[in-house]
Image (cartoon, rainbow, N blue to C red):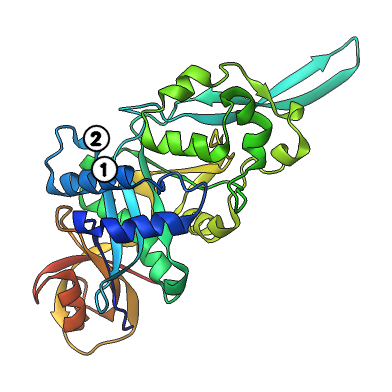
């Protein structure tokens, strides 16, 4: 499996290509705002997070860039946010079911309602996953997604006991979403792109100020809004399926802006992390096993696609090229996940 891609920590020098990716990602991608100052701040936070120089590690955001090492082009990015809802609220809607009954009227039925919550305080969030279309295929998308769990596994004490993932909801190419148009716009008096940008570039105090505090009955919303609650953007369907494969579940919690689903799983139950193991690296011509290999240290984390063979219980033979990508040498250890 010859692949030129390496996932490595973000650097300040990535700003120009990072901004191009943000523009390319389109509307509704909150973690990739079309705002150079915000993106620069993300890069600075990532550098400090990996270096371990943040005063409060729970605020860490481990942003990684997928680089084609043959051309230097950035093909995509993904990130792990150590803790959400700590520095600023992380609001979502939880869908609850209310039982309605009247003996006199001979009626009994259930009604769904949206409740504003901030229930994921301290949870780790995986996100900012974007892969440029021309680089898709060949397992690169899985490398972007699964490497995040190998990073968490390298230092679980830095991350929360629950991991969540927020998927972009149904948003049109011009930045409109039925959920926002039928609900949020009435309370915020602004367009979805405006609210989305504020969410990405402020501490979200505006949500505290303007969001309705009382339950909202789903049946009172227009059909077009009801129809997108808990549904993700068409481009997010593969990510949704991969999250389910990892063990994430949708438990009726959605984004307050576009109604997209929030997935969640116990940190110790993520499939990639559970199935991975630390092995000593050997160099040689070997095939038969393929997957993802990553450095075991958080500070200099790198990962790449790998092909080789398992030797005994604790060693893995692969190419010198793979070791070079990971910046490791024969006899070093790497955390390896192999396809079953």
Residue 256 seen anywhere in this rendered image of the structure:
yes
Assign the C terminus to one quadrant of the image: bottom left
Mark whose residue sits in front, 1 or 2: 1
Task: Identify the residue at image location x=58%, y=35%.
Answer: 191
Q: Position of residue 284 (x, y in %)?
A: 17, 87
Return the residue nearer the eye: 264 or 3. Answer: 3
Return the residue nearer the eye: 259 or 22. Answer: 22
Q: Position of residue 300 (x, y in %)?
A: 15, 58
Residue 252 seen anywhere in this rendered image of the structure:
no
Task: Identify the residue at image location x=60%, y=50%.
Answer: 174
Q: In the figure, is residue 171 to the left or right of 291?
A: right
Task: Give the secondary structure at mark 2.
Answer: helix
Assign the N terminus to one quadrant of the image: bottom left
On residue 41, which mark appears? 1
Residue at the far bottom in the pictured view: 285
Q: Position of residue 186 (x, y in %)?
A: 64, 25
- Residue with the mark numbered 2: 58
Residue at the far top in the pictured view: 104
Task: Identify the residue at image location x=14%, y=33%.
Answer: 55
Q: Is residue 260 above or below residue 327?
A: above
Answer few, some or many: residues within 10 Å of disc 1's Cα (few below 14, many 20 plus, some between 14 and 19): some
Q: Quadrant of residue 86?
A: top left
Q: In the figure, is residue 329 to the left or right of 32?
A: left
Q: Earlier in the sequence, mark 1 or mark 2?
A: 1
Residue at the far right in the pictured view: 105
On residue 52, which mark appears? none
Task: Give the secondary structure at mark 1.
Answer: helix
Q: Is residue 21 above or below residue 219?
A: below
Answer few, some or many: residues within 10 Å of disc 2's Cα (few below 14, many 20 plus, some between 14 and 19): many
Q: Is residue 33 above or below residue 87?
A: below
Q: Position of residue 48 (x, y in %)?
A: 16, 44
């Amino acid at each position: 499996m010859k692949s030129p891609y390496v996932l490595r920590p973000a650097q300040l020098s990535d700003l120009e290509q990072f901004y191009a990716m943000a523009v390319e990602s389109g509307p509704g991608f909150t973690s990739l705002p079309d705002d150079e100052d915000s993106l620069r701040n993300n890069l600075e936070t990532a550098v400090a997070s990996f270096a371990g120089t943040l005063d409060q590690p729970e605020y860490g955001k481990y942003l990684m860039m997928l680089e084609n090492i043959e051309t230097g082009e950035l093909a995509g990015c993904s990130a792990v946010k150590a803790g959400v809802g700590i520095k600023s609220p992380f609001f979502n809607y939880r869908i609850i079911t209310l039982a309605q009954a009247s003996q006199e009227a001979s009626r009994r039925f259930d009604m769904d309602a949206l409740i504003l919550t901030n229930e994921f305080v301290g949870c780790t969030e995986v996100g900012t996953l974007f892969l440029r279309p021309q680089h898709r295929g060949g397992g690169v998308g899985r490398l972007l997604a699964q490497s995040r769990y190998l990073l968490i596994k390298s230092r679980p004490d830095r991350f929360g006991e629950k991991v969540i993932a927020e998927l972009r909801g149904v948003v049109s190419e011009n930045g409109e979403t039925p959920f926002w148009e039928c609900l949020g716009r009435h309370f915020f008096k602004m367009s979805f792109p405006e609210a989305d940008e504020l969410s990405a570039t402020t501490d979200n105090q505006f949500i505290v100020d303007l969001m309705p505090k009382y339950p909202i009955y789903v049946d009172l919303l227009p059909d077009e809004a009801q129809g997108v609650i808990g549904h993700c953007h068409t481009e997010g369907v593969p990510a949704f399926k991969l999250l389910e494969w990892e063990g994430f579940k949708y438990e009726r919690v959605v984004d307050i802006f576009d109604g997209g689903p929030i997935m969640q799983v116990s940190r110790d139950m993520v499939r990639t992390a559970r199935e991975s193991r630390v092995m000593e690296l050997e160099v040689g011509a070997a095939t038969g096993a393929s997957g993802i290999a990553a450095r075991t240290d958080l500070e200099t984390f790198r990962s790449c696609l790998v092909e080789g063979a398992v030797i005994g219980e604790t060693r893995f033979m692969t190419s010198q090229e793979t070791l070079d990508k990971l910046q490791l040498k024969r006899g070093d250890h790497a955390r390896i996940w192999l396809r079953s």
